[in-house]
Image (cartoon, grey):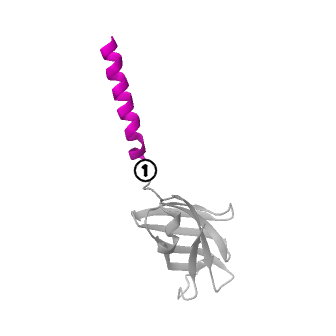
Amino acid sequence: MNATRQSLRVIALAALATLPACGSEPAGQTSGTATVSFVTPNSDDGAVLVALTGPGVRDAQPSSFAYKAYWRVVSANELRLLVVGNLAAGVVATVTVDDLGKLDQYHATVLEVASRADVVRPSTAGYSFTFSR
């Protein structure tokens, strides 16, 4: 019995010693939620499709009940986001990212914009997005 207890104690100590190595985030990395703000030259936008890129973009949520957000992960570094509603300049969504300390590495490319009357804008000039904590 004593040898069995000693063996269990050694196994338990070995398991505890490996726990710090089991973390999902490297040291200094903080995953979390970033806000995505919309910049628009118009006052009647109804939908915007955007490609969000950066290390570890995982999911998206609308910033309020006034918007609907549809998204899909294209790759480990890209998420496509469609936001629909009576869009206004300001925060339209939040995204979960792997490292809030690297927000300068996250970018958005506006792919398409439509008015509230469902008319596709001929150009995406003047549209952009910013990321913040």
Where in the figure is residue 108, as x and y percent of width and height?
A: 50, 76
Residue 11 magenta-highlighted = yes
First to last magenta residue range: 1-24
Residue 36: horizontal and vertical position, in percent?
Answer: 59, 70
Horizontal side of 109 relative to 91 (left or right) equals left
Answer above or below: position of 35 versus 19.
below
The N terminus is located in which quarter?
top left
Q: Report crowding for label 1: few under 14, some 14 to 19, many 20 or more residues within 10 A (C-alpha).
A: few
Asked whether 115 or 27 is in front, the reply is 27
Seen in the picture, residue 102 relative to 12 is either above or below; the reply is below
Side of 62 where 122 appears, left or right:
left
The secondary structure making up most of the magenta span is helix
Q: Residue at x 51, y 79 (%)?
A: 112
Quarter location, residue 10: top left
Instruction: Give the residue drawn at x 35%, y 22%.
Output: 8
**Residue sitting nearer the eye, 20 or 110:** 20
Quarter of the picture containing the C terminus is bottom right
